[in-house]
């Protein structure tokens, strides 16, 4: 690592964050001005419908270090992060949200750890008291389930706020997934990583875009992308139910031989309905994995770029005519 980063890229995915960007950008520019580096700020607009495009065009015209990327529609935060990482040209890259819950002042500490040789510095929430009990419970269950993956540990309470060395970013960009679960990919690539505890401030303007249904879908994407235990659990469940069905069959035969064959009809119907439900549930779990295969084999781009404004950093190796 160089003692002082020659170049630093900040990637900010956003969706309808006009009010927050008006506060974040001046603070971030002031923070980076105090660091001995050449910065660029890449704002990736993931299909905003507010005044974000006009605001960012204005900022990009005033500050050449600001780059505005506007995607053709809403592709999701993971795709927006990927677009920003592909555009970033710094030796170190910082990912942060636009809602002011990722304090720009922490970048100084991240840079200090990067200079000390740490290749990835990620922020970890010390508390989730500002979240609902439902979200806290869901987060604990999700990270517990993710720990079942072989050789992969996603740090609990760690989000996208992190600094990465260029070698880490290049490794991430080599991964070919279309459905990108970035928290899992950050953990999968490995490298020297260090946690940085922090207490996130309250969101400055607006509300979170992640509703319970969307969070559930996000969790399913993560589990199916990095674990296979649901499939193995179904195999175990199938074996157990088959054994129970065999034992119950012996009970039915004994009734036919020594009892009234009409008795137990309600129980049989209940068992049939139970097995039907298990079959449908199993088919749904398998379908989630098949759907991921279907998405990957189509090989569509992760995102489509509608507009690029601003100069940012110039990389001679990447900008040759």
Image: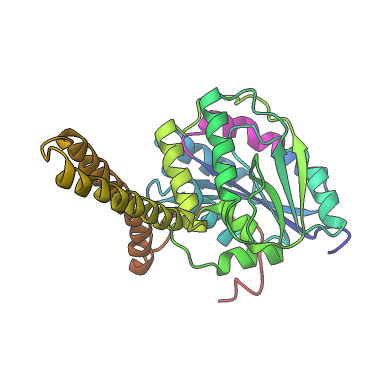
Q: Nearer the viewer, residue 16 or 132?
A: 132
* Magenta span: 15-28
Q: Position of residue 276 (x, y in %)?
A: 23, 46
Q: Nearer the viewer, residue 194 or 243?
A: 243
Residue at the outermost front position = 258
Please tell me which residue is depicted at 25% across the width and 50% down the height of the picture.
249
Q: Position of residue 42 (x, y in %)?
A: 60, 50
Q: Nearer the viewer, residue 29 or 134?
A: 134
Specify whether residue 165 is painted magenta: no
> What kind of secondary structure does the magenta stretch mostly adopt?
helix
Kindly tell me whether residue 310 is visible in this rendering. Answer: no
Quadrant into which the C terminus falls = bottom right
Kindly tell me whether residue 55 is visible in this rendering. Answer: yes
Relative to 290, residue 250 above or below: above
Relative to 277, residue 228 above or below: below
Quadrant into which the N terminus falls = bottom right
In the picture, residue 231 is in which quadrant?
A: bottom left
Coloring scheme of the render?
rainbow
Please tell me which residue is depicted at 56% across the width and 36% down the height of the picture.
139
Q: Position of residue 266 (x, y in %)?
A: 17, 33
Q: Give the number of marks.
A: 0
Q: Position of residue 10 (x, y in %)?
A: 66, 49
Residue at the outermost left position = 262
Name the side, left or right, on which 256 lies relative to 89: left
In the picture, residue 272 is in which quadrant?
A: top left
In the picture, residue 104 is in which quadrant?
A: top right
Please tell me which residue is depicted at 49% across the width and 46% down the height of the picture.
77
């Amino acid at each position: 690592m160089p003692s002082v980063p020659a170049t630093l890229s900040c990637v900010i995915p956003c969706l309808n964050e006009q009010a927050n960007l008006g506060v974040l950008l001046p603070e971030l520019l002031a923070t980076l001005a105090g660091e001995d580096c050449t910065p660029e700020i890449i704002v990736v607009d993931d299909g905003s419908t507010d005044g974000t495009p006009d605001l960012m065009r204005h900022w990009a015209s005033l500050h050449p270090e600001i780059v505005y990327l506007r995607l053709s529609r809403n592709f999701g935060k993971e795709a927006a992060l990927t677009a920003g990482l592909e555009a970033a040209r710094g030796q170190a890259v910082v990912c942060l949200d636009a809602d002011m819950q990722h304090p720009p002042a922490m970048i100084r500490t991240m840079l200090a750890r990067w200079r000390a040789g740490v290749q990835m510095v990620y922020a970890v929430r010390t508390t989730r008291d500002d979240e609902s009990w439902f979200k806290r419970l869901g987060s604990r269950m999700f990270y517990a389930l993710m720990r079942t993956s072989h050789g992969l540990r996603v740090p609990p309470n760690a989000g996208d706020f992190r600094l990465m060395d260029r070698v880490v970013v290049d490794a991430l960009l080599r991964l070919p997934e279309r459905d990108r679960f970035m928290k899992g990919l950050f953990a999968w690539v490995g490298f020297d990583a260090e946690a940085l505890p922090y207490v996130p401030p309250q969101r400055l303007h607006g509300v979170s875009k992640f509703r319970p249904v969307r969070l559930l879908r996000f969790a399913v994407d993560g589990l199916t992308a990095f674990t296979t235990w649901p499939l193995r659990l179904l195999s175990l469940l199938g074996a157990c139910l088959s054994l129970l069905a065999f034992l119950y069959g012996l009970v039915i035969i004994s009734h036919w031989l020594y009892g009234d064959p009409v008795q137990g009809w309600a129980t049989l119907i209940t068992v049939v309905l139970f097995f039907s439900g298990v079959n449908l549930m199993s088919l749904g779990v398998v379908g989630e994995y098949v759907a991921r295969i279907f998405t990957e084999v189509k090989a569509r781009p992760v995102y489509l770029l509608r507009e690029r404004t601003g100069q940012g950093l110039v990389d001679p190796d990447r900008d040759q005519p």
